[in-house]
Image (cartoon, rainbow, N blue to C red):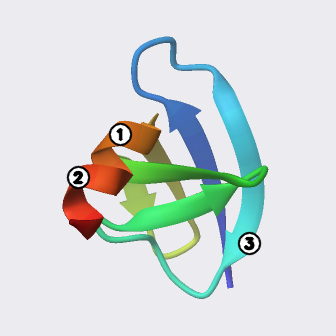
Amino acid sequence: MIPVQYRDSQTEEIIERRYEEGAPSIGQRVQIDSQEFQVLFRWRCVPTSCIVYVRRVEQEMQASQAA
């Protein structure tokens, strides 16, 4: 388990900190506070911690991909 810090890709605001089995992959979708986010890039990922930049997945994007 490593500490992962999720940050907003536009504001760099820390959205959440939590422990994960490993660093999330680029493009992976993650749930944070009942909202879905997509991992854009990782920064300073080392075996002991990782900072991940994400963007919120809009509802219309989800609907178009489901169709």
Q: Residues within 10 Å of mark 1 (few under 14, many from 20)?
A: few
Provide the residue designation for mark 3.
19
Using residue 32 as the reference point, say whether residue 42 is left or right of it: left
- Identify whether 26 is placed above or below 43: below
Foreground residue among 37 and 41: 37
- Identify whether 51 is placed above or below 10: below
Considering the numbered disc 1 on the image, is that residue within a helix, a strand or a loop? helix
Provide the residue designation for mark 2.
64
Which x, y percent locates residue 7? Answer: 55, 34
Is disc 1 in contact with disc 2, using a CB cutoff of under 8 Å? yes
Provide the residue designation for mark 1.
60
Image quarter where the N terminus lies is: bottom right
Using residue 54 as the reference point, say whether residue 63 is left or right of it: left
Image quarter where the C terminus lies is: bottom left
Is disc 3 in contact with disc 2, using a CB cutoff of under 8 Å? no
Residue 46 in view: yes
Considering the numbered disc 2 on the image, is that residue within a helix, a strand or a loop? helix
Question: What is the quadrant of residue 19 in the picture?
Answer: bottom right
Considering every residue shown, the one lying at the far front of the view is 67
Is disc 1 in contact with disc 3, using a CB cutoff of under 8 Å? no
- Identify whether 35 is placed above or below 56: below
Kindly report the distance in space between the C-alpha atoms of the residues bearing marks 3 and 2.
Answer: 32 Å
Using residue 59 as the reference point, say whether residue 17 is left or right of it: right
